[in-house]
RNA sequence: GGCCCGUUCGUCUAUCGGUUAGGACACCAGGUUUUCAACCUGGGAAGAGGGGUUCGACUCCCCUACGGGCUGCCA
C-alpha cells in the first residue's frame, strides 16, 4: 500500500467509442479524490487494441472530459506508445523467474477448453505444459510470456469500497503478459503504467475487481507497491439493467447536446453512488472537500433523469450570468443550433435574471427567453394565439398610450397594468395572457413586467401595436 | 458451471447493535400565484426471503432467491 504518499489517480479509458456516462463518473471520482487532496489526476488512453482504437474515439473522450470540466495533469499518456517498456518488464519477469515462455498455440488452448467444457468441468483454467519445462526442450517457435502465478493459497485484495476480497489461487491461471507477437496484454500494461506513473489510488469500475487479484500478482512479481484499490459499482439504466443504448443517453456528449449544465452533471453524477450525509446540492469545490472513499456505496445505482433535471435546474438558477451565457453558447454549438447574434447575446444576458430560475436545461431556458431572442413580427404559437381574441386586442389598444409616458420601471408599470385591468373589469391574469402572447408569442414566459423591462419601451409598444392590429 | 460483488421508500441515499428507520427527487392533496418555473404545508411510500448470534438486529454470521461482474494471446 502507498496510502501516505501524495495522491495520484488516473482515468484510463479505451478509445473504442464515446465516453460512457459511467466512465464519466469514474473520471469524476478520480478527479475529485485527487483535486480534493492536492494530488494529481492523470489520463491514460488504453489504446493497445489496435483493431478497435480510433483517434476519433480518443478525441470524443477528451471532449467529454473537457465538457465535464475534468482537467487532467500533464499530457494524456498513450498506452500503445509504451509497449517497449511493457515488453521490457515482461522480460524482466522472465529473468526473475516469475514468468515463463509458453509455446502452446491458440488452437491447442481452444481445444483444451472445448474438451473441458465437453466433460462438464467445473472450471477451465488452462494449465500450460511449459510452466516447468526444461528450456532445452523449447522449440524454435513464437512464444507468449505467461506469469508464473501461485497455484495454491489465496490472493487477498484489500479494497477501499468492497472490503477484503479473497480469491483462491487455483481459480486464477497463468495469464499471458506478453503475446506471441511481442505486444503486451492489458493485465501487464495497466500494472506497468500505473506503477511508472506513480498511481497511488486506482478508482475504477467493479468489473475490474477480479482483475485486481491477478494484477496484484504482477506487482508482487516485480516487487512493486500495490496501490489502494477502490472498485466502484457500475451505473444501471432506469430499469435496473446494465446501461445500454436503448436507455437513451449513454454518452457524456449526449448530455451536453441535451443542454444539461456541466456543474449539475457533476453534482448529480457525484451523488450517484456516493454520499456525504444528506447533502444533495453542492458545488464542485464542496465535492472536492467532501469526497472520500468510505462514502462510496457498494451497490449499482440507476440513472434518474428527473433528479438530474432537478439538480441541473438548481445549478442554472445559481449560475453566474457571464458563465451561463458562455455555457449556453457552447451548448448551441454542440447541439448544432444557430449561434447567437451580437444583439441576441446582449438581450439574453439582460434577460438571464428572469429566466434562469425557471429552467432545468438550456433548451428550456432558451424557450423561456424566446421573447428576448425573437424579433418582430412575433409569431404566436397555438396557445398564445387563443389569448389574442378581439376583446383582448381591444384592451391592448387602450394600453399603449399609457405606456408612452410611463417611466420604465416595475413600480410604475404595475399600477398602470392594474388600472387597465380594473377598467375593463378583468383580473390581472386575464390581462397578462394576451400581453404574454403579444410580447413573446408564448403562453409560458417570465413575468410580463420583466419582459417589458428587458426589451424596452419601444419594442414593447411596437409588439403590442402589432398584436392589437 | 466456477469464482467474485451486490440487495433500505418508485429512484438516489442516511443509518456504521438500541431511531416513531431520516433526507432528496418523483408522486398525491392543499396553499401562494400573472402563465411556466420556483416556493410553502400535509400525505402515502422501504430494510428480498429464511435461519442463526445477541438482552436487543437494517446493521454481525449462514442459506436461498434475484441482479451484476469475471472466467481471452479484448480492454
Image: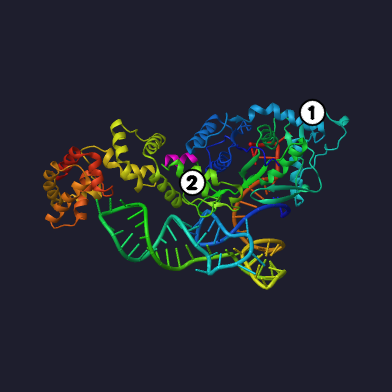
Question: Of discs 2 and 1, which sits in the foreground?
Answer: 2
Q: Nearer the viewer, residue A231 or A448?
A: A448
Instruction: Tell how many labels.
Output: 2
Q: Residue at x 70, y 51 (%)?
A: A164
For the C terminus of chain A, the image quarter is top left
Q: Nearer the viewer, residue A429 or A370?
A: A429
Circle 1: element type: loop
Q: In screen coordinates, is A240 left or right of A343?
A: right
Alpha-carbon distance for marks 2 and 1?
55 Å
Classify A183 as above or below A389.
above
Classify A44 as above or below B61.
above
Circle 1 marks a residue in which chain? A
Task: Say if residue A175 shows up in the picture.
Answer: no
**Crowd band around label 1 with a 10 angstrom C-alpha radius: few (<14), some (14–19), many (20+):** few
**First of labels 2, 1 by sequence position:** 1
Q: Position of residue A51 (x, y in %)?
A: 61, 32
Q: In screen coordinates, is A430 left or right of A254?
A: left
Q: Residue at x 54, y 48 (%)?
A: A243
Q: Which residues are magenta?
A: A252-258
- Number of the label disc, if any, that sits on residue A175: none
Q: Residue at x 19, y 47 (%)?
A: A413
Chief SS of the magenta region? helix
Q: Position of residue B55 (x, y in %)?
A: 68, 73
- Number of the label disc, if any, that sits on residue A141: 1
Task: Say if residue A340 shows up in the picture.
Answer: yes
Protein image colouring: rainbow
Q: Which residue is mark 2?
A: A267
The stretch drawn in magenta includes residue A253: yes
The stretch drawn in magenta includes residue A391: no
Q: Quadrant of residue B65?
A: bottom right
Q: Quadrant of residue B47?
A: bottom right
Amino acid at each position: 500500500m502507498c496510502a501516505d504518499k501524495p495522491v495520484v489517480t488516473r482515468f484510463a479509458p479505451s478509445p473504442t467509442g464515446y465516453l460512457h456516462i459511467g466512465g464519466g463518473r469514474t473520471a469524476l471520482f478520480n478527479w475529485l479524490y485527487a483535486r480534493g487532496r492536492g494530488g494529481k489526476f492523470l489520463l491514460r488512453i488504453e489504446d493497445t487494441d489496435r483493431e478497435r482504437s480510433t483517434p476519433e474515439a480518443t478525441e470524443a473522450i477528451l471532449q467529454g472530459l473537457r465538457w465535464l470540466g475534468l482537467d487532467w495533469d500533464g499530457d494524456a499518456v498513450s498506452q500503445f506508445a509504451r509497449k517497449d517498456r511493457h515488453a521490457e518488464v515482461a522480460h524482466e519477469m522472465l529473468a526473475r523467474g516469475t514468468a515463463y515462455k509458453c509455446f502452446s498455440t491458440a488452437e491447442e488452448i481452444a481445444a483444451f477448453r472445448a474438451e473441458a467444457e465437453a466433460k462438464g468441468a467445473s472450471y477451465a483454467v488452462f494449465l500450460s505444459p511449459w510452466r516447468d519445462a526444461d528450456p532445452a526442450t523449447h522449440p524454435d517457435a513464437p512464444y507468449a510470456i505467461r506469469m508464473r502465478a501461485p497455484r495454491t493459497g489465496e490472493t487477498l485484495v484489500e479494497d477501499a469500497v468492497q472490503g477484503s476480497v479473497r480469491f483462491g489461487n487455483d481459480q486464477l491461471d497463468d495469464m499471458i503478459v506478453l503475446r506471441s507477437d511481442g505486444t503486451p496484454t492489458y493485465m501487464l500494461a495497466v500494472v506497468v503504467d500505473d506503477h511508472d506513473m506513480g498511481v497511488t489510488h486506482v478508482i475504477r469500475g467493479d468489473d475490474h475487481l477480479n482483475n485486481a487479484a491477478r494484477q496484484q500478482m504482477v506487482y508482487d512479481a516485480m516487487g512493486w507497491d500495490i496501490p489502494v484499490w477502490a472498485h466502484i459499482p457500475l451505473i444501471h439504466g432506469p430499469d435496473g439493467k446494465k446501461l445500454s443504448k436503448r436507455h437513451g443517453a449513454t454518452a457524456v456528449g449526449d448530455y451536453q447536446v441535451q443542454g444539461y449544465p456541466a456543474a449539475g452533471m457533476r453534482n448529480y453524477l457525484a451523488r450517484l453512488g456516493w454520499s456525504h450525509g444528506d447533502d444533495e446540492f453542492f458545488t464542485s469545490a464542496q465535492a472536492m472537500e467532501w469526497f472520500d472513499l468510505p462514502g462510496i456505496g457498494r451497490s449499482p445505482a440507476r440513472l434518474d433523469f428527473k433528479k438530474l433535471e432537478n439538480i441541473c435546474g438548481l445549478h442554472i438558477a445559481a449560475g453566474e450570468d457571464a458563465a451561463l451565457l458562455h455555457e449556453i453558447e457552447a451548448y448551441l454549438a454542440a447541439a448544432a443550433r444557430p449561434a447567437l447574434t451580437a444583439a441576441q447575446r446582449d438581450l439574453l444576458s439582460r434577460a438571464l435574471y428572469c429566466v434562469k430560475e425557471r429552467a432545468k436545461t438550456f433548451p428550456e431556458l432558451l424557450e423561456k427567453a424566446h421573447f428576448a431572442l425573437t424579433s418582430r413580427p412575433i409569431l404566436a404559437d397555438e396557445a398564445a394565439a387563443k389569448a389574442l381574441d378581439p376583446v383582448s386586442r381591444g384592451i391592448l389598444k387602450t394600453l399603449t398610450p399609457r405606456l408612452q409616458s410611463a417611466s420604465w420601471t416595475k413600480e410604475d408599470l404595475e399600477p398602470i397594468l392594474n388600472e387597465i385591468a380594473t377598467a375593463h373589469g378583468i383580473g390581472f391574469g386575464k390581462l397578462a395572457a394576451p400581453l404574454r402572447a403579444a410580447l413573446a408569442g408564448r403562453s409560458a414566459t417570465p413575468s410580463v413586467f420583466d419582459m417589458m423591462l428587458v426589451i424596452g419601451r419601444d419594442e414593447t409598444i411596437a409588439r403590442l401595436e402589432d398584436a392589437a392590429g
